Amino acid sequence: MALADFESSPALSELEKLVVRYAVAITATPVEVPDDLFTELERHFNERQLVELTSAIAWENYRARFDHAFGIEAEGFSKGAFCPLPARAGSKTVRNAQD
């Protein structure tokens, strides 16, 4: 499945697409979660579940940004199952983790 085309993917349910939309919104800089998106999430998840979902997304975003800052790459344990980094305007060369 192409994550960039998740909206049109038949591999994801509408609920899964909603969660991916939320993940995209809360990992963007700046964070902007539209009220209608959050209202739709509240139709499917209770408060406790939303806290857990948000925490899981935020944790993975933290790990991805931390690893990216230090040039840490995957060890190949989940080869082919990854989240691509968003394109960056004027991207810089990534430093080697051994530097």
Image (tube, rainbow, N blue to C red):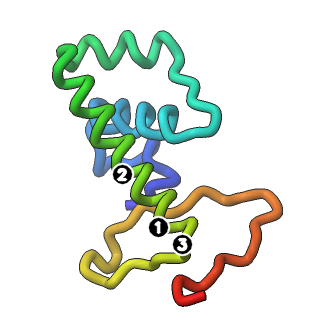
Q: Nearer the viewer, residue 70 or 41?
A: 70
- For the point 38% across and 66% down, the residue is 82
Image mark for residue 15: none
Q: Crowding at label 2, few (<14), some or many (≥20) Cα neighbours within 10 Å?
A: few
Q: Name the residue tied to disc 2.
A: 60
Label number found at residue 67? 1
Residue 35 location, x and y as percent?
49, 11
Query: Which residue is depicted at the point 51% across and 57% down?
Result: 65
Instruction: Give the amino acid type for the residue marked by disc 1 in the picture.
Output: Asp
Q: Is residue 31 above or below residue 12?
A: above
In this rendered view, identify the residue nearer to me: 46 or 6.
46
Q: CA distance from mark 2 to mark 1?
A: 10 Å
Q: Earlier in the sequence, mark 2 or mark 1?
A: 2
* Image position of 14 with respect to 37: above or below: below
What residue is at 42 percent from the left and 38 percent from the top?
23
**Residues at circles 1 and 3 in contact by the CB criterion of under 8 Å:** yes
Res 22 → quadrant: top left
Disc 3 target residue: 70
For badge 2, the amino acid type reads Glu
Residue 75 image point, x, y percent = 33, 83
The residue under label 3 is which amino acid type? Answer: Phe
Side of 15 relative to 93 (left or right): left
Q: Quadrant of the C terminus?
A: bottom right
Alpha carbon distance from label 3 to label 2: 16 Å
* Residue occupying image coordinates x 36% and y 30%: 18
Q: Decide if residue 13 is on the left or right side of residue 37.
A: left
